[in-house]
Image (spheres, rainbow, N blue to C red):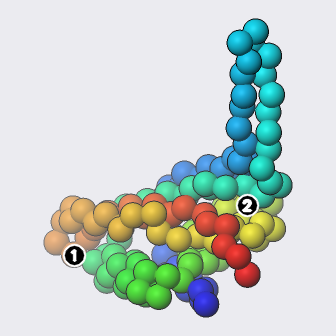
Amino acid sequence: MATERPFPAIKPTSRDYDPGTYPSSTFESLDGTKTYIRYGNKRVNASLTLSFSNITDADAALILANYEDVNSDWDYVTFNSLSGTSGIGSTALSTYIKETNSSLKWRYSAPPKVTSVFDGISNVSCSFVACLDAP
């Protein structure tokens, strides 16, 4: 069973959030008539990218350790006001990014990318995808 793994308490420099879509298909007939079929009432394929600029190598190592912890058991990541949603002034927006009111769970979509910029200083980029897991 998947477990929540909190993301380290590091404030991102920037974030890019896509709330995803509702699964559907479009069928178009020869005369151009379109029919839309929606397959559910839950969003899928939400994505989140967090960027951390000029953080210490120790903080970069915390992010890499979180990646290892989450993926070793196929767990999922949670965010709080000290991590992924740090710096957001609106509670309503942070609720979306944390996916508090949905059944979506954040997982890493790729390994974190670490770029060393100076002795002891790194830039890190993390990409996440929200999965709709069965309880």
Q: Is residue 66 left or right of residue 44?
A: left
Q: Is residue 72 above or below residue 131?
A: below
Q: Is residue 92 left or right of residue 63?
A: right
Q: Secondary structure at mark 2?
A: helix
What residue is disc 1 on? 120
Circle 1 residues within 10 Å: few <14, some 14–19, many ≥20: few
User: Horizontal and vertical percent for residue 104?
Assistant: 69, 67
**Going by the picture, which residue comes out furthest to the top?**
31
Q: Is residue 118 above or below residue 66?
A: above
Q: Which mark is residue 94?
A: none
Residue 26 vs residue 113, the one in the foreground? 26
User: Horizontal and vertical percent for residue 115?
Assistant: 24, 62
Asked if one can make out residue 128 in the rendered structure from this viewpoint, the answer is yes
Circle 2 residues within 10 Å: few <14, some 14–19, many ≥20: some
Q: Is residue 31 left or right of residue 80?
A: right
Q: Secondary structure at mark 1?
A: loop
Residue 122 figure quarter? bottom left
Between discs 1 and 2, the one toward the N terminus: 2
Q: Residue at x 51, y 63 (%)?
A: 128
Q: Residue at x 54, y 51 (%)?
A: 16
**Going by the picture, which residue comes out furthest to the front?**
30
Q: How far separated are the C-alphas under marks 1 and 2? A: 34 Å
Residue 65 vs residue 59, the one in the foreground? 65
User: Where is the N terminus found, in terms of image quarters?
Assistant: bottom right
Q: Mark 1 belongs to which amino acid?
A: Gly
Q: Residue at x 79, y 39 (%)?
A: 37
Q: Mark 2 belongs to which amino acid?
A: Tyr
Q: Which mark is residue 96?
A: 2
User: Where is the C terminus found, in terms of image quarters?
Assistant: bottom right
User: Horizontal and vertical percent for residue 53?
Assistant: 37, 61
